[in-house]
Amino acid sequence: MIQKPKGTRDILPEETFKWQYLEGKISKLLENYGFDEIRVPVFEHTELFQRGVGETTDVVQKEMYTFEDKGGRSITLRPEGTAGAVRAYLENGLSSKPSPVKLWYNMGMYRYENVQKGRLREFHQIGIELLGTESYLADCEVILIGKRIFDILGIKNIKVTLNSIGCPKCRGEYQKVLKEFIGKNLDKYCDTCKSRFERNPMRILDCKEEKCKKLNDGAPMMIDYLCDECKEHFENVKRTLSGQNINFEIDSSIVRGLDYYTKTVFEFIDERSGLTVLAGGRYDGLVEELGGVHTPAVGFATGVERLMEMFEEANKGKINKRLADLYVLTIGEKENIKAIQISEELREKDFYVEKDLCSKSFKAQMKYADKIGAKNLLVIGEDELLTGKAKIKNMKTGEEKEVELEIEKIVECIK
Ligand code: ATP
Ligand code: MG
């Protein structure tokens, strides 16, 4: 039998209803903040991600699903959502909409990763992008929304960490100092780090190799080299978040995995697993990088699989699949016609109704109704058709009630 590719998952019926619940809650929340959903292609021109994510990132250097299509174009499955969202924003003139433009997405992402706990090759991200403002208020709103997501899902064990990685102005000075520090041991770093030394030394601080992590101990931190503007921006963010009772920690080691970040960066960490569940930051240079006019922006993405794991842990047994309000048990042609008619009318009124579709025996239908956990059972046989009256059994209490075979009466009994 053919099996699914490594790093992919099937989301089965026992799980999909939880996904729908979680996605429904989050989309409603984002609507309350004025965010509109955007859907962009699963594949884009490879160049978009090379430019938008950054040539020296793990994503571009190691993780992209890139192939040549039959027309000889280099195509890449989207590894993240921001580059595509910004491309669509520019290509479709969304920049002429009232500013700031607020977009959200829920999309599958594709990365050739070392598969392990919390690390898949196909995974999903729900993300938001707030484009067109450099105000610290936007950073705060985005972080607040991140926090609210965990609140509305009943997830408590989450830690918010914050850093500022400055702007191109203050980064120049910092990179000099950082290169001096790393340069002393450059020969001991991994090959990827070596290759990043000239082009993007900050990337080296995000290396996942143990030996590089050790070498990075005691490295100078961007936060100590912020220019006055970046410093003030960061102070404002911290003060405003504190004013909203958001607990956060400053973690000066956060540099984020994508090249486009500036100023505020943040990660929401699952305190139990230590995994980052939601991450983002400000990216003031990206829109220009992709050919637009200077448009400061800020956003985040959360890994839905990781979020779902925390959600399940926090809500064990509390979110349940919808059960049938009624099973209509019936045998015979005329009886089936009546049963179909009743079922259809009830479904129109938003009841969940099932009936036999396999010409099962009376006993087998009973068994099925029991297995699917139907809440009520209505039997329609020859007698019921003749008298126009039938019994509805409450499957939980065993109680039976006689009703006329009229929709209003049935509704009364099962609602
Ligand atoms: P890391 O440093 O852990 O590789 P990253 O910088 O690649 O993270 P982002 O690209 O910012 O992460 O992704 C945002 C979020 O998406 C992560 O915090 C995580 O929840 C989720 N995510 C990223 N990669 C994967 C993956 N391979 N499988 C499942 N979820 C993922
Ligand atoms: Mg990664």
Image (cartoon, rainbow, N blue to C red):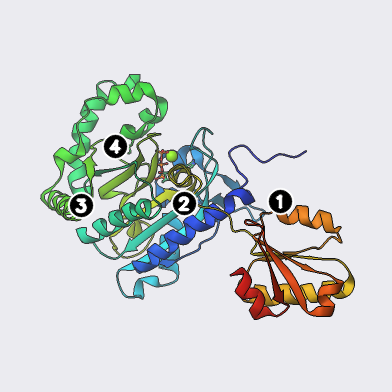
Nearest to viewer (mark 3 / mark 4): 3
> Callout 3: few (<14), some (14-19), or many (20+) C-alpha neighbours within 10 Å?
few
Q: Which residue is mark 1?
A: 371
In the figure, is residue 27 to the left or right of 299?
right
**Real-space Cα distance between discs 4 and 2?**
25 Å
Q: State the mark number for residue 202.
A: 4
**Residue 296 location, x and y as percent?**
28, 60
The amino acid at mark 3 is Asn
Question: Is label 2 within 8 A of ligand 1 (CB to nearest ligand atom)?
Answer: yes
Residue situated in front as seen by the camera: 391 or 221: 391
In the rendered structure, which disc, 1 or 4, sits on the residue that comes first in sequence? 4
Relative placement, left or right, of 279 versus 310 is: left
Using the numbered discs, state the Cα–Cα distance from disc 3 to disc 2 in whole angstroms: 27 Å
What residue is shown at x 25% (from left), y 60% (from top)?
A: 138
Q: Secondary structure at mark 4?
A: helix
Label 1 vs label 3, nearer the camera: 1
Circle 2 — which element? strand
Q: Name the N-terminal-most of marks 3 and 4.
A: 4
Q: Is residue 186 above or below residue 165?
A: above
Q: Nearer the viewer, mark 3 or mark 2?
A: 3
Residue 69 in view in this figure: yes
Q: Earlier in the sequence, mark 1 or mark 3?
A: 3
